[in-house]
Structure formats: C-alpha cells, structure tokens
Amino acid sequence: MSCCGNHRQQLTRREAATPGGAAPPEPAARPLAPGNGVLFAYYGANELVLNGAVSGRRYRFAERGARLAIDPRDAPALAAHPRLRRITP
C-alpha cells in the first residue's frame, strides 16, 4: 500500500543518478508565449524531467537554477514537487 495514494502518479519524475548517467535527450515542449506561463526554478542537484499532469507537456530542468515557464494548468501539480519553486514577478 502506498503512503501517498495516487497523487504522485500525476507527475512522472526522472532524475539522473549522477551527472554522467543522464538519460538520452527527449524532445522539449514548445516554448510558451511570453506572459502565458508560470515561472518555476529548479533547486535539485541533477537533471529533472516532468510531464505536466493536465497539458501533457514535458518540462526539462537541465541543472540547478534552471528556470522554465510552465503551463498554468500544470502549475499546481508541479508546485507540489519539493525541488521546484514558483518564481513570482
């Protein structure tokens, strides 16, 4: 029995074990138009790839400090990730 229910199944998380053990590159999501996304910053040690729970977009944070504009529909689910922080303007 899982302790977190199905909440984490909405996000697919993949982190490389070491910097040299990164997964093969995958196509990135098309960039959002300026002003249409919610800005997030990544504070983990290795690459992080997430799929948006609503949009299905793939978000790739290549390194610590990487910032990406996230589809506003995906923002609530990504905000639950412990290594992501929403950047407010």
Image (cartoon, rainbow, N blue to C red):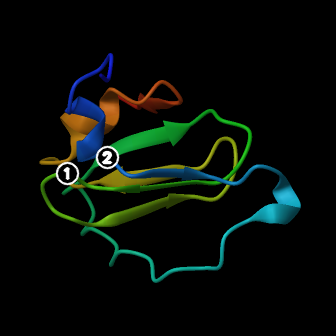
For marks 2 and 1, the one nearer the N-term is: 2
Outermost residue, right side: 20
Q: Are marks 2 and 1 in contact (CB under 8 Å)?
A: yes
| Image quadrant occupied by the C terminus | top left
Residue located 41% across and 32% down the image: 87
Residue located 74% across and 65% down the image: 22
Q: Quadrant of residue 40?
A: top left
Considering depth in this image, is 72 or 25 the residue closer to the camera? 25
- Quickly name the residue at label 2: 11
The spot of residue 45 in percent (x, y) is: 74, 39
Q: Quadrant of residue 3?
A: top left
Considering depth in this image, is 83 or 37 the residue closer to the camera? 83
Q: Is residue 13 left or right of residue 31?
A: right
Residue located 19% across and 51% down the image: 53
- Tally the marks: 2
Name the kind of residue labelled 2 in the image.
Answer: Leu
Q: Secondary structure at mark 2?
A: loop
In the rendered structure, find residue 53 and report the number of the disc placed on it: 1
Image position of 1 with respect to 16: above or below: above
Image position of 76 with respect to 5: above or below: below
Q: Secondary structure at mark 1?
A: loop
The spot of residue 52 in percent (x, y) is: 26, 55
Q: Is residue 46 left or right of residue 20?
A: left
The spot of residue 73 in percent (x, y) is: 12, 48
Q: Is residue 37 left or right of residue 67?
A: left
Name the kind of residue labelled 1 in the image.
Answer: Ala
Image position of 26 with respect to 8: above or below: below
Residue located 31% across and 46% down the image: 11
C-alpha gap between disc 2 and disc 1: 6 Å
Other-residue count near label 2 (Cα within 10 Å), few / some / many at <14 / 14–19 / ≥20: many
